[in-house]
Structures are given as C-alpha cells and as structure tokens.
Amino acid sequence: MMTPRQRWLALLNKQPADRIPTDYWATGEFHAKLLSKLGITDTQAQHPPVDLGSARSTDEILWRRLNIDHPRGVGPRWKLKAHPDDPQADMWGNRHRRIDYGTGSYDEFTTGPLAAMTTPEQVRAFRWPDPDDFDYSPMTEALHHDDGYRIIQAGGYEPFLIYAGMRGMEQAYEDMLLNTDMVEAALEKMFAFFFEHNRRIFQAGRGHIDMTYVAEDLAGQTGPLFSLEIYRRFLLPYQKRMADLARSFGIHVFYHTDGAAHAFIPDLIHTVGIEVLNPIQWRCPGMERETLARDYGHLVAFHGAIDNQQTLPFGTPQQVAEEVRQTAEIFKSCRWFCAPCHNIQAVTPVENVLAMYETAASLKSPG
C-alpha cells in the first residue's frame, strides 16, 4: 500500500500508483455535514495537535476513513490583524461580507481600495502587502516534525482575482482594455510581493514542500473570460516566472482554472509548465474528457472531473459511481486524481460523495 504522498508523487513523476489518487474540495457547510454524518467529532481529535505529521484532527480522521489523499497545507503567520490603513479590511485593503444563498454562504468582496483611483501613480502609492509582514519560522518548525505521510502544499499565486476585488469586478475587466496602465501597475506590485513571499515560503520549507498552486480563472461556463491575447499580455509572463521559481526549489506546479479554458491549455503546458490541471469541468465546451485525454493526456495530469454541478448534487450514488468508472476508463492512458470538479456544494447528498471515494478506491490507477 502506498501512502498518499507516494501516490501523488508517483503521478507527478509519471510513474504508476497502486490505485487512483483522490482529493477533496468542499464548502464549509458540506464539510460539516459530512463530518456529522460519519460521527467524526472534535472529541476524537488530539488538542492541541502533536505536530504536523501525527495530528489526529477531524480532517485527518475523515481523510483516512475515506482513503482521501488530500495534501497538507502549510503557510507563514501574518503578523498584522488588518490592513494598516483600514482596520476592517484584509491585507489587500478589501472589505468582505457574508452572502447567504439559502443552503450556505460565501465571503464576497464589498469595497476595494483601488475602486476610485484614476492613475497608475495612485496604484503604486497604495500600501501593498510586504513579505516582512509575515513570520515564516512556524513553517520550518512544523515541517521539521512532518512524518512524510502526505504531500506538502505551500505558496500560491492568483493575482487577477485579488485585483478584481480591489478594483471591482466589472472595472477590473474593463481595465484590461481601457485602462491598461492601471492594471499593469497593480499586477507589477502584486508580482513583486508574491515572488518574494513565495521565495521565502519555499526557503522556509527547506526541501519539504512538494507542490504549489498557480491559479487564475481564465474561463466561464461557456467560454473564455478574456482573449488569449490579453492573457498573454497581462498574466502569462508572471505565471511563468512564478512557476520557474517553484521549479528552482524542486516544487511541482498545480494549476487551477474553472470553465471552458481549452484555448489556454497549450500556453499553460508549454510556456508556464504546469504539471496538474484542475478542476476539469467536462460539461463545458472544449473540456470534454475525451478531448483532453487525446490532446494533453501525455503532457499533464488531470485533477477533478467528477461533476459537482449535476452528478454529485442531483444524481444517485449509482450514477456517481458510474461517472467515476467512466472517467477512469477515458483517462486510462493518462494520469488522473479523482476529485470533485471544484467545491462540493451544501445540497450534495453525503451518500453520493461516499460513492465517489469508495469507487475510486477500488480502481487501479491509470497511466
């Protein structure tokens, strides 16, 4: 039997695993429902945790019970409580509020600090996050005690999502056509922060970090959110440099983009150099599993692909199991991590999720 870390690294290194590796993404509401259904409570966990490797948290109990190969995430400690210029804002100066949608809630941006700005000089003068605001030593201490059972994920980069919060979603997209100097100034500042921040994270990891996330949602349900030309101008060069930084530390690059992102995949693979593509929303045009397997299955590992818009929330356990088996067959010559295609939603029956993991655990890993 392989450990979760061995399964992940086998696929990342283009080697066979003993079974299909699995992962778990869920909303807080569903996660609480799943723990309750399985009778996993805080009283079963160690408090405080002994260390990163042996801590019996409720999450770790869940993952082991369902044979989930979820990574362990580590990060530095932010030394501030809020943005220096706004005690109600996060480190980017964004304020948030909870939006209730009936069966749960999401944290959404409300006001952003760049919304009223009109010049790139104002953008550059804003008080941007500083790596010196973070303490990286807790990472080193935690990883010193890691038992190596799960892969370690640390660091990340998703700047346009942050810019959309700081500027306002509609204005952020308009800027890419009408106010290019504004978005360029902001992205330059963000990259400078993230590059040094991630460098310090990777340095603090001292060879224990296996994977990092590089992300940006490039597409919606039916097509791209912006043109390939705009992507190549504003986002691609920075993504490549961030991925190059990770590789210089021997760290694998996991990439997330929702939607019908087929047009961007060649650049992501051949220029950025991603190794894992997530979340594979195969009902979106161009993201059909057969197409991805044929065109890119020999170049990148796929992560996700179990539909959480129809099958998981509204199907039966039998239909979920069949989708897992069908996906395994389509990806039989590829490397695939079985997981929901984004966060499992609160309305999803627990039985459907159990069927997903039980079926995946019974299947030999493709590739």
Image (cartoon, rainbow, N blue to C red):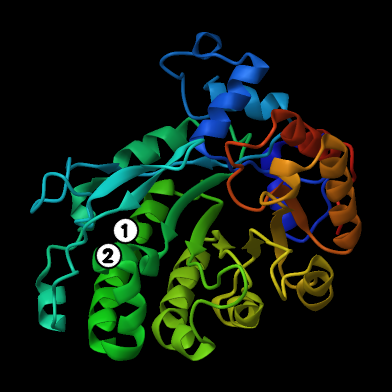
Q: Identify the residue shown where x is 33% and y is 55%.
A: 200
Say whether residue 21 is left or right of residue 99: right
**Label 1 crowd bin: few (<14), some (14–19), many (20+), radius 10 Å:** many
Does residue 249 appear anywhere in the picture? no
Residue 291 position by quadrant: bottom right
Q: Is residue 77 above or below residue 238?
A: above
Residue placed under numbered mark 1 in the picture: 197
The residue under the point 59% across, 74% down is 273
Q: Residue at the spot x=28%, y=82% of the render?
A: 184
Numbered label attached to residue 193 = 2
Given residues 94 and 203, the one toward you in this image is 94
Q: Amino acid at mark 2?
A: Phe
Q: Is residue 236 above or below residue 111?
A: below
Task: For residue 313, say whether it is visible.
Answer: yes
Are there few (<14), some (14-19), or many (20+) residues within 10 Å of tag 2? some
Q: Secondary structure at mark 1?
A: helix
Instruction: Name above or below for residue 235 compared with residue 86.
Output: below
Q: Is residue 199 left or right of residue 367?
A: left
Q: Amino acid at mark 1?
A: His
Whether label 1 touches label 2, CB < 8 Å: yes
Where is residue 364 drawn, in percent x and y? 90, 45
x then y, percent, for residue 248: 49, 67
